[in-house]
Image (cartoon, rainbow, N blue to C red):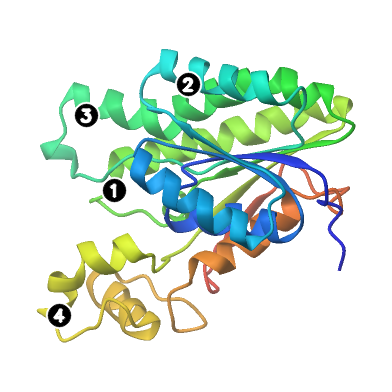
Amino acid sequence: MDLGLSGAKAIVTGGSKGMGLAIAESLAAEGASVAIMARGLEALESAAERVKAAGAPEVIPVGVDMSDPDSIIDAFAEISRRWNEVNVLVHTVGPGDGKFEDLTDADWQAAFDMGTMSAVRSIREALPLLRAAEWARIVTLSAHSIQRQSPRLIAYTAAKAALSSLTKNLSKSLGPEGILVNCVCPGTIVTASFTENLKDILAAQGFDSADTHDVMRWVETNFGHPCDLGRAGLPEEIASATTYLASRRNGYVTGATVNVDGGTDFI
């Protein structure tokens, strides 16, 4: 299926690893030029090579601190110097975890800066470029935890819930301009960082953090959150859904919160 992304220009925040990188590669494979934004310059350079190899005619790696408003302004200004229009903005960054009793006011503010305000600031800066294009799409990445609560993710979930609400509201205000805005909610996704960070924790319970079925069994055992397919997902599975929503082929889906979680009771 031709998604109509050949020749398009796309920005992916958090595009140097995990789901963000998978999305950038997927867009590139469809023929889009891609600007990837992330904090680590070494990871950015490596990611840029991968995105270029995936088929992007042009790749722009941009260093940015998504917790810093001025850094976001500077990052989008850099893209504006290279491109006079953008068709796609995919925003993937998010905050860390923590239990309620462990979080200070500063922790809560940091969670909303990363989980919500980074999207607000990115979309604000991207809008002139999106409005200049013949067609435009915005996709945000929230989380299925906004529908399936976990005490260890209270600030993360609150910030991601606000992001989902922001996305829905923007779909209404930007719809008359032909800019479609959607939100993807990933379930448990096995990324390289997930495998590395949780390797010892899962191993202590007899699970392999690189095995998608073991990961979902661990999630069900410890959090009571099963999924119908009985396995965790992969970054490329988030990327395929996101790429469709970000494409010109998607002409009538807007304001949607799309669960990509292996099947749950949530709609």
Q: Is residue 121 left or right of residue 28?
A: left
Residue 20 in sight in this render: no
The disc labelled 4 sits on which kind of residue?
A: Ala
Is residue 6 or residue 258 the one in the foreground?
A: 6
**Which sits earlier in the primary sequence, circle 3 or circle 2?**
2
Residue at 39 percent across and 80 percent down: it is 212
**Which sits earlier in the primary sequence, circle 4 or circle 1?**
1
Q: CA distance from mark 1 to mark 2?
A: 25 Å
Residue pointed to by mark 1: 153
The disc labelled 1 sits on which kind of residue?
A: Leu
Badge 4 crowding class, 10 Å Cα cut-off, few under 14, some 14 to 19, many 20 or more, is few
The disc labelled 3 sits on which kind of residue?
A: Asp
Disc 4 element: helix
Q: CA distance from mark 3 to mark 2?
A: 20 Å
Q: Is residue 78 left or right of residue 157?
A: right
Residue pointed to by mark 2: 72
Badge 3 crowding class, 10 Å Cα cut-off, few under 14, some 14 to 19, many 20 or more, is some
Callout 1 touching callout 2 (CB < 8 Å): no
Disc 2 element: helix
Disc 3 element: helix
Indicate whether 205 appears above or below 240: below
Indicate whether 149 appears above or below 118: below
Residue pointed to by mark 3: 107
Disc 3 vs disc 4: which is toward the camera? 4
Quarter occupied by the C terminus:
bottom right
**Which sits earlier in the primary sequence, circle 1 or circle 2?**
2
Residue pointed to by mark 4: 203
The disc labelled 2 sits on which kind of residue?
A: Ile
Q: Is residue 190 left or right of residue 7?
A: left
Q: CA distance from mark 3 to mark 4?
A: 29 Å
Q: Is residue 174 left or right of residue 267?
A: right
